[in-house]
Amino acid sequence: MAEISFDQVTKVYPDGTEAVSSVDLEIEDGHLMVLVGPSGCGKTTLLRMVAGLEEITEGEIRIGDRVINDVEPKNRDLAMVFQNYALYPHMTCYDNIAFGLKLRRMPKREIDQRVRDTARALGLEDQLKKKPRALSGGQRQRVAMGRAIVREPKAFLMDEPLSNLDAKLRVEMRTEISRIQQDLETTMIYVTHDQTEAMTMGDRVAVLRRGLLQQVAEPQALYDSPANLFVAGFIGSPAMNMVEASLVTDDGKARVGFGGLELDLLESTLDERPGLRDYAGRKLAIGVRPEDIEDPEYLPPGAPDTRIPVMVEVREAMGPEIFAHFTVDAPPVLTEDTKDLAADRGLHAEELEGQAEAGSAKFVGRLNPRTSAVRGRPMELAIDVRRLHFFDLETGRAIV
């Protein structure tokens, strides 16, 4: 086991494409670090540079005190698990798991002991004589993990290992991977596009966009205090609602206005975010998490009752909660950050630009399942102004 550190790591391809730009990152010994971001953000490239499958253009990567830039992949003592399992179809599970140990010419008795111990930990004891084609997707993934675990490497590198599994199995497997990582107390770098995986599995999460590191933090800190618009919109499902607003201050009190609506902020808000004072009379972006919008009838004790009138356009019954979709008559936040976020959700930039021209933003609230919200009917919803997020429209940075 060892810590892994990145010092100004950059990757530029021969055609001039800069896939990774000056990444500084520290991964503590025994921790699980998740690299998350949209497709093409550089997370897999970063992982492959650690593995030695991609050359490093600039900077250094260290495992412990050892710089590994020029170390052959086979000599880095790392184990990698791919999304396509990469199992040998003609070999049994036993032989697939044992393959790396046989290459090292380890004694047969030790190989057998390690393979069986690993199979027991992964629940594969009854599958060792089977070939991959006779296994389910989850079992194949466990065999691929077993092949990595049995080597007892310094660190594990996982490149979207669950992307080929169905939703139910992904939940089971991410729990299994977390358990194994904690039991082994080994360092792991885990790449995923799925922010739910990132939030539930990582000791720390690093968010990337266009090859640049946006924020590194513990999952809850990342969710509660996003550093910028991109992180705010990428982390969370449903995504954070964002709209352009104006800030007005008067006699020490403050309120934000958008679409003809005004929300009175608590007196403590300006003290907690002194940077907001500089935005008096100016435009800014505000963000509201769906769970901070509620049917007033079911507000928790002590929550501020700041209401806005809405027309429910779509009502999604999710069982323990209801998603209520509605439109706010104010322009959505239109920046390069939000365009990238829209693209990641499968929307074209033109759609977001069209909403901005129309001056209407799509919102969703996560409501109590007993809400009276009905599609096509007006109602009032309460916004928890204690939980608002504020961002600079030009830089995209959080205002604190």
Image (cartoon, grey):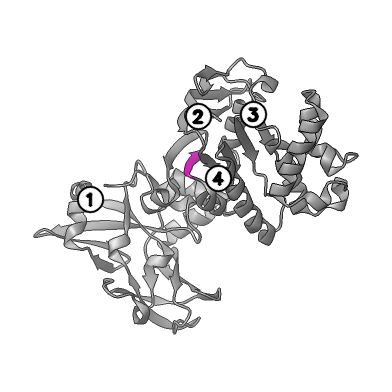
Question: Which of the two discs, 2 and 3, labels the residue nearer the N terminus?
Answer: 2
**316 or 341: nearer the eye?**
316
**199 or 305: nearer the eye?**
199
Question: Which of the two discs, 2 and 1, labels the residue nearer the N terminus?
Answer: 2
* SS under mark 2: loop
Q: Which residues are magenta?
A: 203-208
* SS under mark 3: strand
Question: Disc 1 residue type?
Answer: Arg
Give the class, few, some or many, for how many residues have Cα within 10 Å of label 2's Cα (few <14, many ≥20).
some
Between marks 1 and 4 in the image, the one whose residue lies nearer the viewer: 4
Q: State how far apart marks 1 and 3 are (Cα).
A: 44 Å
Q: Is residue 28 above or below residue 298?
A: above
Q: State how far apart marks 4 and 3 are (Cα).
A: 17 Å
Give the residue number, with chain letter if any, for mark 2. 3
Q: Is residue 216 left or right of residue 345?
A: left
Give the class, few, some or many, for how many residues have Cα within 10 Å of label 4's Cα (few <14, many ≥20).
some
Give the residue number, with chain letter if any, for mark 4. 182
Question: Residue drawn 32% across and 61% down?
Answer: 387
Q: State how far apart marks 2 and 3 are (Cα).
A: 12 Å
Question: Which of the two discs, 1 and 3, labels the residue nearer the N terminus?
Answer: 3
Give the residue number, with chain letter if any, for mark 3. 78
Position of the N terminus by quadrant:
top right
Q: Is residue 147 left or right of residue 38?
A: right
Q: Main secondary structure of the magenta part?
A: strand
Query: Can you give x and y, in whole percent of width and height, for residue 173 in the image?
Result: 66, 53
Examine the structure image and report whether residue 258 is included in the region drawn in magenta.
no
Give the residue number, with chain letter if any, for mark 1. 273
Question: Which of the two discs, 1 and 4, labels the residue nearer the N terminus?
Answer: 4
Between marks 2 and 1 in the image, the one whose residue lies nearer the viewer: 2
Asked if labels 3 and 4 touch by Cβ distance under 8 angstroms, the answer is no
Question: Disc 3 residue type?
Answer: Leu
Question: Disc 4 residue type?
Answer: Gln
